[in-house]
Amino acid sequence: MRQFQKFRPLKSLAILATLLAAMPLAGAATAAAPASLGWTTPAQHLAHMTLQQRVGQLFMVAAGATGASQATMNVLSWDHVGNVYLAGRSSAGINATAAVVRRMTNTVSTATTDNEYLAVATDQEGGYVQVLSGPGFSKIPTALAQGTLSTATLEADAKNWGNQLRWAGLKVDLAPVLDTVTQAFAPSNAPIGYYDREYGYTPAAVSAKGNAFLAGIKAGYVMPTVKHFPGLGRVTGNTDVTGNVHDTQTTINDPNLLPFQTAINNGARWVMVSSAYYDRIDSRPGKIAPFSTVVMGTMLRHNAGFTGIIVSDDLCGAAQLAPWSWAVRANNFINAGGTMILCANPNAVPYMYAAVLQLAQQRPDFLAKVNAAVLTILTVKHGQ
């Protein structure tokens, strides 16, 4: 994997995506291009992809950490899905995990992803949220315990943890958590504080230690993902298992955004947006964060200057998303400016994929958003 470089020209990406929306899609003649052809730029690769392959890049589907289900293997091939994350738990170690990853990466071909590599991720935070363990993997302490280490020590440790993921064939770590929880509220905060997932109890502490973890993971040649923007430190319910979760305090210029802004300034290229409502940011009915142009457009793209991948939290199995069909969830997220749909249920992907594909075929404005998102994904995947 190449070193990561900050890529700034978001406006040029949007303009190019609009132009690509008017271009004819690659057909059978170009789909037969040899795997060795290669691409000078992500934009050239985007132009060569079929629309079906482009839409597949917008998804990150769950695979069992001890082995992908047939449903996952099917969507990697049939729906051209370009990204996957290992879910659950595995104590089998690096070599066994590498075999799990190889089985999935072997699906990459001219027909599936136009030879674009499969980005494999997992949640390797530490403590209660460490998917991979066993021979070759360190036992990673909780974020709260990591926060007691010196910045230099934590960065060095995280580099080692990143290297372990890379040796197992992974490209992305869905960490660090940069949510700020006060010490008094932490026991009542189901998604973060209850599991000691915070790096400290102030934005400054979370920023310093969370970004040390981020720097270490990057130094291990794995792409970190900061989460859960704009923060889950003030809610009581966990959106995975609870519906109608609201944050009634966080504002558009909140002090608790500091850790996220620091991470973006430090070159973070992946940001996961939470699924909570933010009443003081976007009070419109139904505008949970992954459906909010204010959260993803105004706050992340414009205010924070983020040009990388905005990945959702689980849009498939989470209780918070129950009011919407799978199809509506997918289209709402892309339409609001999201980049990559994370889905814990591979059986939901065909419905979401078909919905995005159909709307892209029907509406040029939506197609432009699909092209812009895919261009961002290809750009970040190749270290820009």
Image: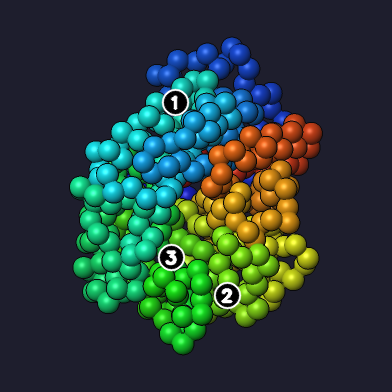
Q: Are marks 2 and 1 in contact (CB under 8 Å)?
A: no
Rendering coords of residue 16 (x, y %): 63, 39
- Which image quarter holds the C terminus? top left
Mark 1 lies on a secondary structure that is: loop
The residue identified by callout 2 is 235
* Horizontal and vertical percent position of residue 222: 34, 48
Looking at marks 2 and 1 on the same chain, the residue that comes earlier in the sequence is marked by 1
Q: Where is mark 1, residue-wise?
A: 107
Which quadrant holds residue 280? bottom right
> Which residue lies at the image location 28% right of the left edge and 51% below the top edge?
133
Task: Give the mark nearer the N terminus: 1 vs 3.
Answer: 1
Residue drawn at x 52%, y 42% is 61
Residue drawn at point x = 75 percent, y = 41 percent:
365
**Viewer-proximal residue among 161 and 39:** 161
**Three-letter amino acid code at the position of disc 2:** Val
Closer to viewer: mark 2 or mark 3 = 2
Answer yes or no: is residue 208 visible: no
Q: Quadrant of the N terminus?
A: top left
Q: Amino acid at mark 3?
A: Val
Q: Going by the picture, which residue comes out furthest to the bottom?
A: 184
